[in-house]
Image (cartoon, rainbow, N blue to C red):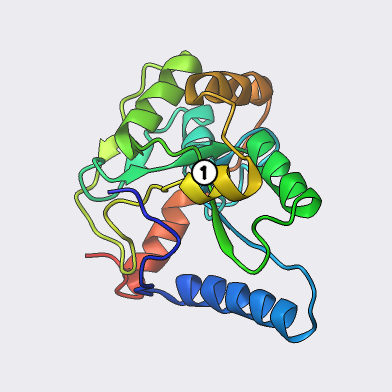
Amino acid sequence: MPTPEHKQPSLASVYALTKYDQERMCLLYGAAYDLPAVALRFFNVYGPRPALSNPYTGALAIFASRLLNDCQPLLYEDGGQRRDFVNVADVARACRLALERDGADGQSVNVASGRSVSVLEIADQLARVLGKAIEPEVLGKFRAGDIRHCFADVTLAREALGFEAEVPLEEGIASFAAWLEGRAATDHFDAAAAELMDRGLTT
């Protein structure tokens, strides 16, 4: 089911906790000092100019780094976990709307496409667009703190900000692939995965 902003938080990682704390501080500051404040909840942001050599930068950039080095993208679980990928151009527009309009003041707002896609589909699609005949490897391992599915209910963004994502996923991935042409990436995924294993964070 899509996740609405009013869903009760269930924080399963330090990463999630810090994001939630920052959001609450922003909204509390706004309320305390009578300043308009909006907390935008970005889902899986992708697009040109990510840090390709950073193994924590996001699924599409990590998959791109692997594929550019002719390595298989590695997928946790069974690859069927679903996520909501939103293009960076749409995210920038949502930020502008939050500054220009007051309909979302004092609220948390999902910034997403409202469409879910499996991680396996994303890896396959990027490989195809890059012209790489490399199938992802499904590891069957689980990372502590990961959730099975995470995609957004975007009703509030539409009603309060007049925001809807405009860049279709297929078009966004094609644009990302065009930006990747001729670029090099140092693939650090294996080292990051080994550290998770050493710390007992994958099973």
Q: Which residue is at 72% across, 68% downward? A: 37
Q: Position of residue 174 (x, y in %)?
A: 56, 18
Residue depicted at 30% across the width and 59% down the height: 147
| Quadrant placement of the C terminus | bottom left
> Residue at (64%, 36%) from the top-left corner?
90
What x and y, as percent, mark residue 40?
Answer: 61, 58
Identify residue for label 1: 112
Q: Residue furthest top?
A: 131
Question: Callout 1: 10 Å neighbours few (<14), some, many (20+)?
Answer: many
Residue 93 percent coordinates (x, y): 71, 39
Q: Nearer the viewer, residue 50 or 97?
A: 97
Q: Is residue 144 above or below residue 191?
A: below
* Residue 203 appears left or right of 170: left
In front of the other: 140 or 34: 34
Name the kind of residue labelled 1 in the image.
Answer: Ala
- In the image, residue 196 lies at what x, y percent? 38, 66
Q: Is residue 65 above or below residue 109?
A: above
For residue 51, say whether it is visible.
Answer: no
